[in-house]
Every structure is written in C-alpha cells, then in structure tokens.
C-alpha cells in the first residue's frame, strides 16, 4: 500500500505515520519544513518513545519524505492508495490544491484504483471539510469521477504527543503516551478497507468524534486554562491541583451527560472513560506545557469546538453546566504573546468589552443568561 502523509511533525511521526509504517506501507511524509524533510529522507527511520508506567522505544523504519511544495508530491498522490494528514485544521485548505492536482493527474493517467483520503485532525468531520476545499479546485464535470474513485473518510484521533525533550540527541525522535485511538467512518471508503492495526472501524463516527471532543479535548483545554490561571507549567502539575481536578472532572461529567442523552452511552462505562483520561493528564512523563495546549483559544471557543459545543448540548438537554462555564471563563483569560489568537482575543476583549467579545467569539447571542454567567466567572478570576 502506497501512502503519502501530509505533516511530518510530532503527531504525524508519533501517531498516524507510525501506524501506517508499522502496517508495512510504502510511507512518504510530506511537509514544508525542508530541514525536517531532508533528515527524514536521509535517515528513513526514527524512534518513538512510548512513556507511561512502562517505557519503551519503538523504531519506525522504511519511511521516505518529500517537500509538499515539490511538484513530485502531485505524482505521489496520483499513484497512492491512501493520503492522510496531521497538519492542523487551519492548514487543510492550504493543501487542498495540491491534493486536487494529484487527483486530476490520476484521472489523466487513467488510474482508477481506489484512493482514500483521511484527515487525522482535532476537528469534527475534518475530511468532509477537506473534500469541499479539494472539489473547489476540480472542474465540476470531474466531480462524478472523484466520487466514484476517491473516498474522503472522516476520522477521530486521540493521542497526546507533546514536544520532544530538547536535550534529545535525535530531533526526529518523538515522545507519545501509551494510549492511542484512531477511529474511521467505514461507510466512506471507496474500494476495500485496508487492514491497519490501530485503525478502528465504525458506522457511527459522530458518537466517537463527540465523545473525544467533549471529554479529552474539553478536559485538556480546561486543565490548561485553569493551570495558567493558577501558575502551573505542565498539564500534569495542573491536574494534580485538587481545585483544577474537581472543575475538569465536573466539566467532563457535564459534557458526558450530553453524550449519554444524545448517543445512549453507558453511564458507568463513560465514567470509566473519564477516569482513564484524567489518569492520562496526570502522566508525569509527558511534560506537556499548559501554554502549548491552550494555544489557539479563539478556535477552541468557537461553536463547533471543545468548550462551546458541549455547553450548547447542556442547554439542549437542560443539564447542569457550571464547570463548563468556569472553563470557558478561564479560556477567555488565556494570555500568550507568541500565539496570534491569544493576542487577538485579548485585543477583542479590551476594545469591545467582555460581553461583545463573547458574542463574537462564541456566537452565544441567543443566550444572554449564559453570557452573563461567563462574565461573572471571568470577573471572579480577576479578583
């Protein structure tokens, strides 16, 4: 199986790229970081440090690499059996034209073998959104051919991959936690579904997308935002603060009640899932910085993301949301001069006032009482 994977960063190498390489794929990384690409192409291998109660080092071998701006990337797409991404939600649109050119070359070559594209990003239905960006670069007359021969497969991904220790000798090495989850929508594949260890199939992807978004992502973000508020540097330190642990667990239980109502999750099993995630946050070997996890707060405060979407669910089902509101207020307090979104959010609050900023960022205009509650919590944090 020939695979080209966009995104050779820590998540690309430590998670999806590793699973694909382990499946004996002809694996090529594509990235714009030329120094990284050169080293990957030269070494064609790297180590993944799996940390937890038991440490292990797993070697990834027989990988190649290419600059994603190189015209040969288009040829790789034209000949591939699968394309995957781990580039970040905001970059998907930027790689869409390259994917479209590869698909068009595929058509020109008469390559009718199935091609499946999977965006492995922290977003809801990311591949479906990528599909729309790709189709915008393909003539409408060719859309039928694309639908017949190219599968755009949505997925849910879950693995904590913090930056590698700078003291490590090999910059290609990556650190990951023991837990990983890659769930794909089996109804969206074209042709036979490849057998890849670690890739789980479902015909009800949204249940798992929202389970991860409302639990791991919600809890991770709130841990980071409250952690910064209380002077903690890492997620591990923050979640070991009893006050933060109480709010984070409460928020995940509130969002969990939405999932139980919406998808019929078993309450006992979901509580166990929450406890497992809290244990992952407390992993002392990950050294995950609260500032890194908290970045891009404007995206994380948008209606379809990890804070506002579960909050809206609690309103839909008339459920408690006190802890979620505390988490949202903490997110609005996030400050990081190196993060453009944090700088822009601070400017928005300063220029328009808190209420208008919440309306603009979270699009909660229809819920004045909720805005008022968030403002109250925000002001309490100022004291």
Image: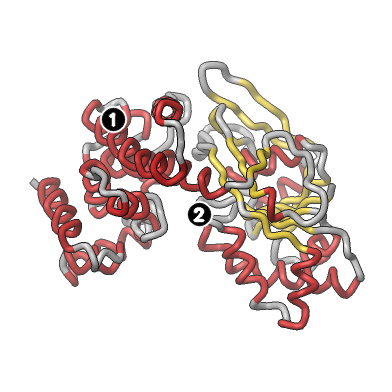
Q: Residue at x 51, y 63 (%)?
A: 90
The answer to whether residue 290 is visible is no
Outermost residue to the left: 383
Whether tag 2 and tag 1 are in contact, CB under 8 A, the answer is no
Rendered image coloring scheme = secondary structure
Residue 22 in the image: state x and y as whole percent: 76, 35
Residue 149 in the image: state x and y as whole percent: 81, 64
Q: Residues within 10 Å of mark 1 (few under 14, many from 20)?
A: some
Q: Residue at x 14, y 58 (%)?
A: 372
Describe residue 7's horizontal placement relative to residue 210 as left or right.
right
The answer to whether residue 71 is visible is yes
Residue 346 in the image: state x and y as whole percent: 25, 62
Q: Residues within 10 Å of mark 2 (few under 14, many from 20)?
A: many
Q: Residue at x 76, y 41 (%)?
A: 43
User: Could you give the CA–CA distance between mark 2 and mark 1, rounded to whole angstroms?
Assistant: 25 Å
Please give the label number shown on residue 174. Answer: none
Q: Residue at x 79, y 58 (%)?
A: 115
Mark 2 or mark 1, which has the lower sequence index? 2
Outermost residue to the right: 110
Residue 254 in the image: state x and y as whole percent: 30, 40
**Nearer to me, 365 or 320:** 320
Q: Secondary structure at mark 1?
A: helix
The residue identified by callout 2 is 123
Q: Is residue 59 above or below residue 254?
A: above
Q: Secondary structure at mark 2?
A: loop
Q: Is residue 122 above or below residue 242?
A: below
Quadrant in the rendering for residue 103: bottom right
Describe residue 202's horizontal placement relative to residue 214 as left or right.
right
The residue identified by callout 1 is 245
Number of residue marks: 2
Describe residue 232's horizontal placement relative to residue 113 as left or right.
left
Quadrant in the rendering for residue 191: bottom right
């Amino acid at each position: 199986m020939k695979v080209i994977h966009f995104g050779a960063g820590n998540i690309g190498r430590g998670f999806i790229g590793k699973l694909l390489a382990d499946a004996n794929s002809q694996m090529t990384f594509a990235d714009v970081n030329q120094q990284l690409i050169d080293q990957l192409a030269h070494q064609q291998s790297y180590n993944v440090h799996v940390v937890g109660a038991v440490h292990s080092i797993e070697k990834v071998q027989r990988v190649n690499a290419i600059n994603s701006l190189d015209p040969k990337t288009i040829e790789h797409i034209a000949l591939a059996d699968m394309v995957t991404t781990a580039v970040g939600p905001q970059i998907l649109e930027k790689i869409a034209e390259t994917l479209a050119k590869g698909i068009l070359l595929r058509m020109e070559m008469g390559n009718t073998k199935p091609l499946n594209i999977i965006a492995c990003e922290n977003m809801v239905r990311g591949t479906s959104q990528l599909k729309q960006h790709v189709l915008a670069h393909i003539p409408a007359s060719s859309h039928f051919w694309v639908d017949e021969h190219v599968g755009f497969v949505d997925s849910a991904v879950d693995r904590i991959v913090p930056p590698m220790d700078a003291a490590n000798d090999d910059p290609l090495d990556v650190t990951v936690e023991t837990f990983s989850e890659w769930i794909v929508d089996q109804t969206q594949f074209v042709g036979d579904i490849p057998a890849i260890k670690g890739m789980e199939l479902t015909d009800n992807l949204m249940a798992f997308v929202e389970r991860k978004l409302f639990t791991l992502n919600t809890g991770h973000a709130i841990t980071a935002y409250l952690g910064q508020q209380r002077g903690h540097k890492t997620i591990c330190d923050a979640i070991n603060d009893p006050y933060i642990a109480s709010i984070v667990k409460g928020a995940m239980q509130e969002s969990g009640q939405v999932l139980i109502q919406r998808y019929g999750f078993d309450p006992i099993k979901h509580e166990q899932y929450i406890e497992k995630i809290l244990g992952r946050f407390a992993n002392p070997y990950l050294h995950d910085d609260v500032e890194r996890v908290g970045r891009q707060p404007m995206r994380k405060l948008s209606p379809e993301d990890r804070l506002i979407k579960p909050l809206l669910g609690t309103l839909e089902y008339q459920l408690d949301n006190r802890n979620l509101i505390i988490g949202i207020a903490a997110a609005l307090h996030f400050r990081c001069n190196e993060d453009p979104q944090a700088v822009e959010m601070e400017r928005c609050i300063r220029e328009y006032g808190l209420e208008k900023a919440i309306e603009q960022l979270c699009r909660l205009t229809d819920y004045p009482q909720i805005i008022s509650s968030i403002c109250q919590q925000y002001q309490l944090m100022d004291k």
